Image (cartoon, rainbow, N blue to C red):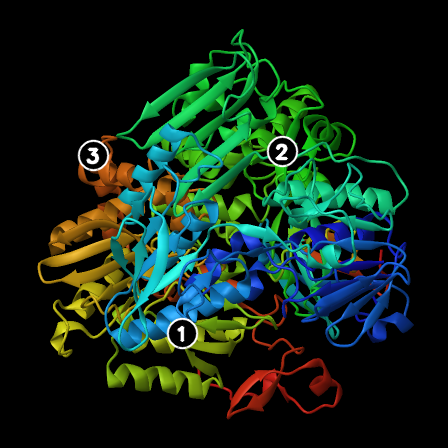
């Protein structure tokens, strides 16, 4: 994904950046967050795992991924874009159902939780 | 290669060549109609306003590489020595191989005055469009409904009579022989068809030979005279007495012509000149030309195979056909007349129900030879592939009404049995698509093999074979919602109602697998809304909602939302208009009037929605539910309170209905309309529920919609009083909500409902299922439990947290939004405008005092 090249932080070593409290997240519903100039989407799964992917829907160009429905497909945790319903694997960002369109994926970032705080490893992508 | 003719059969030939071996031939197609290939079988729909473009055949075929289509050009001469075709526009086209697919032309009988301007034939798109405009013009001139006579009671004649009837022309079909469709039907079948046609308001005259078209003093047609001295009144005459193969080119080129007309071909579709082939209705095989599309397609495939250097031969005509003529199902197949020696007939005839069905069996009553079906041709798909094979059951079972047919053996057809005669697909080919090519449903098999892709009559059979083949591999033909639920929506609705489960987690654990998806989660949210009447954002279930329901607004292409306050019945005070106007102005929203008499405000950002709704709720508005699969709007005309013609208070009724059903979640959106008189200004019959005032009360129509497949609503009940009307709508809507499939609108639901509108009437007015009390109670609970979901949201800080643009910057606008002003209002900027920087960034739109 070229459009979402991480901002200034790339010049530094990758670092864990605090984004929000884990209590700000809602199970199986995304929340958008801003890291530098980049819009990301955070998802807290039913299993308790948290994933961070780019909030920009590559098919519409709108920043709406956080507002998609969370679910599963063949065991993979997924989000369906609310715009045209393409389905993405939250772990890898890969598009699992491009609905006949060219396959485009989401950028993903590693996530950690420390002391009730959600951290995203910035300056590096998975 | 040159193909003369650009109709259905020519289209199939070229399609077959370019899909099998693209670029193998340079093909020039010469069509003398001005339009490219269209579905001639579907011509009649163009009479009722369907655009001719909708019956066009896939245009990419004649646009394929190596293919040149010339329309409006008539071939005038074949020079077999030089191998060229000359055309009326002076052009000359050389060929290595020439294919004649010129079809037939409609004939006019030797009747005095048959060339009068009010006499028509029924063959081409041009014929149909000319007939339509003539009828419209003449009806206006006469200022009364017209009368029409169709000469010729064959297949086309009935088609034409039905077409005239849709144009409000009272039609009489005149047939010279003793019965309708005498080439396809025996006497009892013809009589059954005649009764059905007459029940549909058309007249039929048999054994009548027309001699002249009679004109009045003004020169306009006023009737048709017959050999026995009688006359029939007529303002328009359509001749459907037969077709003649268009073999003139071949005659002039000295190709062999059958004495009854038609270019003689062999089983390879070659004419007497091996460089020239003929296919379709112009071709005469074993002394016969046949005017059906399926044999024409079969010839096209044979010819294509030869042109690509392989061997194939035309097996002879399969004249099996299933048609809906003037609204009546007619099908014949195999040896329908029982000409085989010793053939036995098994006949089921029910003149009251309008059914005639006949099976022809071999002399030992074991093998099916053919049959005729009039009035109900459901069994056609099952029976036709069995021709020439043991019936494997009591023949009577096949002739009983539909349910028993479904139970007839079918999945075990031999591999070589032809299932789709339009496309020549056997049972074995369908099984291969499932076992070897990975198809897992009927749609996949259809796309992969073309089985059922033309007339569709074999789809029930294809479904059974696909189901049986999937079962062999341990799979079931999927009817469930998605990978998480094997159940359909109605099954799931009942399961949730009976168990009383009220969270997605509990439901998926009990009845499904995984963590759901964008298909099943909104369905369960909708079912829970119908059963629990809880707020969309309550508890865990908030996560099930599609973004529209989740933020109670409509997502737009750039990620912003639109806002639609409820305006019951479209009635709004000047103060209300001002309040909406002020909100839109203060937040810089684009405004537009909707089709359902509401005002839509576009460009609202996620974090602005609570502020916008705070203003709207203060001004007395509530959610319009334009975002939900829910009751949307009740459109109305102004009705008797103002209108000179209105006979009931349509606005009052619309407001009452809208306030009653507001907030109701359903399988798909629901729209209502109320008109104050029969002029129908509210276009109520285009709605799921349409109410039209009468002098005595209200007529209730159900199952209409606009959209992709528009449909008029069907009359359910007449002259209802206010209370009965409301009760009937309560029951209709609640019954639909409980039993419809996901995203199935009322029109499709009604079409699928066992017993159709009559059964629905019995459920609603005679309580035939004993569920009316339950439906009434469910609606009463809905009405009592209603609260404005936007007001409830504004009163709950927990719910308001969802409207933060960013979890770590809750009020910062999405920096990617950009707008341009057009006609005085903002709209999303295009990519070019963004690149050129000529945009308003969202953050600079007017800030609002909070």
Number of other residues with Cα within 10 Å of mark 1, as a class: few under 14, some 14 to 19, many 20 or more? few
Q: In this view, does B780 lie to the left or right of A106?
A: left
Q: Quadrant of residue A58?
A: bottom right
Element assignment for label 1: loop
SS of the residue at dot 2? loop
Number of residues whose C-alpha sits closer than 10 Å to that of mark 3, classed few (under 14), some (14–19) or many (20 or more): few
Q: What mark, if any, has residue B594 been given in the picture?
A: 1
Q: Which label sits in the foreground, 2 or 3?
A: 2
Residue at 70% x, 66% y is A56
Q: Which residue is nearer to you in this view: B170 or B167?
A: B170
Is residue B75 found left or right of B43 in the rendered image? right
Residue at figure coordinates x 46%, y 39% from the top left: B489
Q: Is residue B359 visible?
A: yes
Mark earlier in primary sequence (2, 3) = 2
Residue of label 2: B318
First reached walking from the N terminus: tag 1 or tag 2: 2
């Amino acid at each position: 994904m070229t459009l979402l090249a991480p901002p200034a932080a790339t010049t530094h070593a990758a670092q864990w950046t605090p984004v929000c409290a884990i209590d700000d997240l809602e199970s199986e519903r995304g929340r958008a967050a801003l890291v530098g100039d980049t819009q990301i989407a955070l998802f807290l799964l039913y299993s308790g795992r948290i994933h961070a992917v780019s909030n920009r829907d590559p098919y519409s160009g709108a920043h709406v991924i956080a507002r998609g429905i969370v679910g599963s497909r063949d065991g993979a945790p997924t989000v369906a874009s609310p715009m045209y319903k393409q389905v993405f694997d939250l772990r890898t960002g890969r598009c699992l159902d491009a609905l006949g369109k060219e396959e485009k994926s989401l950028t993903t970032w590693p996530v950690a939780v420390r002391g009730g705080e959600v951290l995203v490893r910035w300056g590096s992508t998975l | 290669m040159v193909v003369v003719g650009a109709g259905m059969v020519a289209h199939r030939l070229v399609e077959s060549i370019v899909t099998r071996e693209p670029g193998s031939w340079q093909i020039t197609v010469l069509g003398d109609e001005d339009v490219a290939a269209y579905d001639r079988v579907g011509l009649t729909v163009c009479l009722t306003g369907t655009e001719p473009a909708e019956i066009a055949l896939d245009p990419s075929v004649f646009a394929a590489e190596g293919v040149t289509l010339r329309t409006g050009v008539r071939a005038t001469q074949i020079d077999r020595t030089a191998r060229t075709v000359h055309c009326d526009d002076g052009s000359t086209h050389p060929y290595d191989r020439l294919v004649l697919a010129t079809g037939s032309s409609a004939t006019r009988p030797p009747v005095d005055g048959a060339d009068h301007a009010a006499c028509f034939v029924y063959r081409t798109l041009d014929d149909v469009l000319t007939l339509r405009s003539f009828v419209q013009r003449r009806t206006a001139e006469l200022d009364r409904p017209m009368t029409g006579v169709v000469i010729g009671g064959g297949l086309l004649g009935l088609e034409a009579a039905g077409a005239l009837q849709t144009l409000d022309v009272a039609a009489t079909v005149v047939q010279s022989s003793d019965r309708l469709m005498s080439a396809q039907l025996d006497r009892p079948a013809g009589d059954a068809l005649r009764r059905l046609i007459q029940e549909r308001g058309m007249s039929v005259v048999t054994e009548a030979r027309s001699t002249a078209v009679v004109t009045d003093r003004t020169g306009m047609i006023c009737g048709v005279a017959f050999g026995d001295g009688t006359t029939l009144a007529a303002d328009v005459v359509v001749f459907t007495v037969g077709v003649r193969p268009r073999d003139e080119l071949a005659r002039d080129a000295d190709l062999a012509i059958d004495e009854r007309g038609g270019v003689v071909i062999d089983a390879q579709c070659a004419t007497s000149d091996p460089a020239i082939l003929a296919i379709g209705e112009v071709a005469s095989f074993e002394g016969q030309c046949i005017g059906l599309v399926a044999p024409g397609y079969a010839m096209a495939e044979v010819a294509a195979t030869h042109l690509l250097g392989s061997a194939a031969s035309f097996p002879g005509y399969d004249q099996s056909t299933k048609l809906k003529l003037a609204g009546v199902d007619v099908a014949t197949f195999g040896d329908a007349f029982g000409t085989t020696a010793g053939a036995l007939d098994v006949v089921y005839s029910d003149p009251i129900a309008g059914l005639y069905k006949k099976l022809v069996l071999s002399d030992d009553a074991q093998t099916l030879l053919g049959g005729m079906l009039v009035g109900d041709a459901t069994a056609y798909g099952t029976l036709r592939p069995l021709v020439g094979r043991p019936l494997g059951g009591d023949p009577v079972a096949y002739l009983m009404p539909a349910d028993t047919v479904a139970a007839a053996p079918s999945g075990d057809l031999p591999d070589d049995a032809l299932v789709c005669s339009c496309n020549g697909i056997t049972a074995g080919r369908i099984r291969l698509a499932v076992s070897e090519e990975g198809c897992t449903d009927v749609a996949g098999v259809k796309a992969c093999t073309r089985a059922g892709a033309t007339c569709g009559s074999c789809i029930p059979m294809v479904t059974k074979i696909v189901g049986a083949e999937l079962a062999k591999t341990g799979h079931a033909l999927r009817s469930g919602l998605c990978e998480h639920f094997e159940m359909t929506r109605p099954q799931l609705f009942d399961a949730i109602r009976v168990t009383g489960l009220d969270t997605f987690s509990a439901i998926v654990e009990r009845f499904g697998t995984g963590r759901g998806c964008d298909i099943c989660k909104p369905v369960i949210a909708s079912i829970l809304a119908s059963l629990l009447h809880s707020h969309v954002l309550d508890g865990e279930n908030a996560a099930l909602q599609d973004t529209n329901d989740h933020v109670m607004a409509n997502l737009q292409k750039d990620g912003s939302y639109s806002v639609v306050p409820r305006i019951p019945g479209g009635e709004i005070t000047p103060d209300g208009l001002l309040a909406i106007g002020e909100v839109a102005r203060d937040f810089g929203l684009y405004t537009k009037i909707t089709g359902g008499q509401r005002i839509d405000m576009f460009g609202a950002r996620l974090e602005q929605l609570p502020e916008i709704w705070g203003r709207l709720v203060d001004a007395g508005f509530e959610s319009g539910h334009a975002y939900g699969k829910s009751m949307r709007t009740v459109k109305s005309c102004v009705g008797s309170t103002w209108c000179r013609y209105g006979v009931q208070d349509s606005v009052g009724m619309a407001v009452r209905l809208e306030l009653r059903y507001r907030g109701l979640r359903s399988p798909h959106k629901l729209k209502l309309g109320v008109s104050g008189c029969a002029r129908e200004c509210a276009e109520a019959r285009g709605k799921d529920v349409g109410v039209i005032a009468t002098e005595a009360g209200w007529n209730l129509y159900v199952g209409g919609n606009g959209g992709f497949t528009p449909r008029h609503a069907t009359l359910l009940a007449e002259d209802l009083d206010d209370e009965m009307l409301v009760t009937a709508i309560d029951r209709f809507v609640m019954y639909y909500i409980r039993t419809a499939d996901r995203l199935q609108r009322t029109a499709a639901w009604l079409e699928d409902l066992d017993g159709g509108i009559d059964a629905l009437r019995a459920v609603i007015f005679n309580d035939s299922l004993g569920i009316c009390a339950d439906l009434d109670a469910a609606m009463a609970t809905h009405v009592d439990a209603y609260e404005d979901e936007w007001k409830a949201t504004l009163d709950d800080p927990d719910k308001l947290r969802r409207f933060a643009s960013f979890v770590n910057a809750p009020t910062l606008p999405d920096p990617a939004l950009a707008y341009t002003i057009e006609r005085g209002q903002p709209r999303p900027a295009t990519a070019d405008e963004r690149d050129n920087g000529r945009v308003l960034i969202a953050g600079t739109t007017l800030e609002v005092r909070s």
